[in-house]
Image (tube, grey):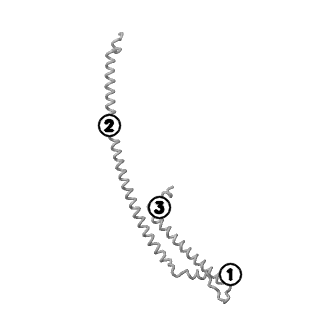
Amino acid sequence: MEERLEKRCDDIYFPFDVRLGGLDSQAKWLQKEVKAIQRQLASQHQISASINRKHSKSINSKAPASTDKHLVASIDTTSTPDDEQMIQNKMESMHAELNELSAYAYDKIGWHQFNIENILERLQNISNAIQKMDERWTRNDEATRSFIAAWSRMCRDKVDACFPTSSCLSTN
C-alpha cells in the first residue's frame, strides 16, 4: 500500500521523469524497427535479384528492371538521421513539450491554491457563524432556565400559600 502511494506521489510530483523515460524507450524501439525494415528490404532485394520468377525473358534479351530493385534504390539509407541526431531531435521536442506541461501544471497549481484559500476563508466564516450561534443559544438557554426556575418558584409559593404545609396540620 505504501509503495503504491509512493509511486502515485512520484507520478504526481515528478511526471516529467516518467514521461522522459517512456520517450527514451520509445525512441530506442523506433530505431530497432527502422533497422529491421532496412534489413528486410535488403534481403528482399537479394532474393529478387537472384530468382526472378515474375518476369519472363525479353525477346531482345534485355530483362526489365525489377520493381523491387527500384523500391530498394528509392530508399535513401544515407539520409536517415543517425542515432545521436535522432535522440537530439527527440530531446528538443520533449523539452518543448515538458515546458508546455510545466506551464500548464503551474497554472493548475495556482488555480487550486486560489480555490483552497477561498475554501479556507469560507470555512473560517462558517466557523465564526457557528460560534456566534452557540453563544446566542447559550444565552437563550440560560434565560430559559432562569425563567423556568423563577416560574417554578412562583408556582410553588402560590401552592404553598393555598395549601399550607403539613407543619400547620401537625397533631403534636
Q: Residue at x 36, y 55 (%)?
A: 114
Residue identifier under label 2: 136
Q: Residue at x 32, y 32 (%)?
A: 142
Q: Which residue type carries mark 2?
A: Arg
Residue contact at pointers 3 and 2, CB within 8 angstroms: no
Q: Earlier in the sequence, mark 1 or mark 3?
A: 3
Nearer to us in this view, 116 or 40: 40
Give the quadrant of the C terminus. top left
Closer to the observer: label 2 or label 1?
A: 1
Q: Is residue 15 above or below residue 33?
A: above
Closer to the observer: label 1 or label 3?
A: 1
Residue identifier under label 1: 53
Q: Earlier in the sequence, mark 3 or mark 2?
A: 3
Nearer to us in this view, 166 or 86: 86
Q: Which residue type carries mark 3?
A: Asp
Residue identifier under label 3: 11
What number of labels is visible? 3
Q: Residues within 10 Å of mark 1 (few under 14, many from 20)?
A: few
Q: Which residue type carries mark 1?
A: Arg
Secondary structure under tag 1 reads: loop
Q: Where's residue 167, x and y in %? A: 34, 14
Q: CA distance from mark 3 to mark 2?
A: 50 Å
Q: Where's residue 102, x and y in %? A: 41, 64
